Image (tube, rainbow, N blue to C red):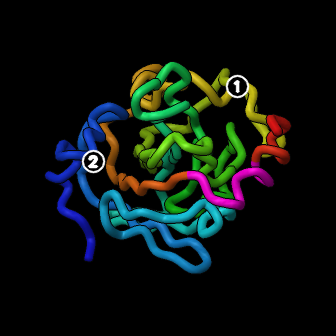
Amino acid sequence: MVFDVSEWDGPLHLSDVDERPKVPLTVTHETVCIDKLGKVLKPSQIKKKPKLEWEGMDPKKLYTIILTDPDVPSKNDRSLAEWHHYMVVNARGNDLDSGDTLTEYVGSGAGKDTGLHRYTWLVYEQTAPLKCDELRVNDRTAAGRERFKASAFRKKYGLGSPVAAICFQAEWDDSVPALYKQLGVA
């Protein structure tokens, strides 16, 4: 069941990240589908870049897509928030590989004993191709991912409110140390 976008401003406080989206986003990983707001997943379930779907997606239009964690290092201490896990601009429709990847995808990696983190996928429609001056971040580093603000990014580049979005939650599991090693923080 797809969530009601009015829930965006509910108990998950997703307006911490950005405004309410126009429509729900569905995110499909190899073994799990995120179609309910706040669904709890394990990092081991979302290691690879997923597929995205939303009502009104137009393969002829360009989109910016962001995955961000506003709870770094934890919900009680958001001093490094937001920490972005993925960012692509100029994607044609939901074809993530067609866009200009600014930050390569890494799955969730909440620190041990930091509780559940909110991982928020945001989709913004573009009116023209973007030329971004942001630091390019690969999937082998954590540097440059911290203290990001999705809402500030979209305002900087003249993007409107999110056209689609969803949030899932995850906390540390036994797969996280491998991600930390990959990112050079272990």
Residue 121 percent across, percent down from the top left: 45, 50
Q: Amino acid at mark 1?
A: Gly
Q: Which residue is found at the position 41% from the left and 44% from the top? A: 124
Look at the picture and state if 35 lies above or below 8.
Answer: below
Choose the circle earlier in sequence order: 1 or 2.
Answer: 2
The C terminus appears in which quarter of the rendering? top right
Lateral position of residue 61 relative to residue 99, left or right: left
What whole-number distance in Å separates the C-alpha atoms at marks 1 and 2?
Answer: 26 Å
Residue 65 lies in the magenta stretch: no
Question: For this rendering, which residue is in front, 3 or 13?
Answer: 13
Question: For this rendering, which residue is in front, 141 or 62?
Answer: 141
Does dot 2 land on a helix, a strand or a loop? Answer: loop
Lateral position of residue 37 relative to residue 9, left or right: right
Q: Residues within 10 Å of mark 2 (few under 14, many from 20)?
A: many
Q: Amino acid at mark 2?
A: Pro
Which residue is disc 1 drawn over? 144
Q: Which residue is found at the position 68% from the left and 50% from the top? A: 105
Look at the picture and state if 127 lies above or below 105.
Answer: above
Lateral position of residue 126 relative to residue 179, left or right: left
Look at the picture and state if 107 lies above or below 89.
Answer: below
Q: Which residue is found at the position 34% from the left and 53% from the top? A: 164
Q: Which residue is found at the position 32% from the left and 31% from the top? A: 16
Q: Is residue 88 visible?
A: no
Residue 122 percent across, percent down from the top left: 42, 47
Find residue 21 and name its label. 2
Toward the front, the furthest residue is 113
Does dot 1 land on a helix, a strand or a loop? Answer: loop
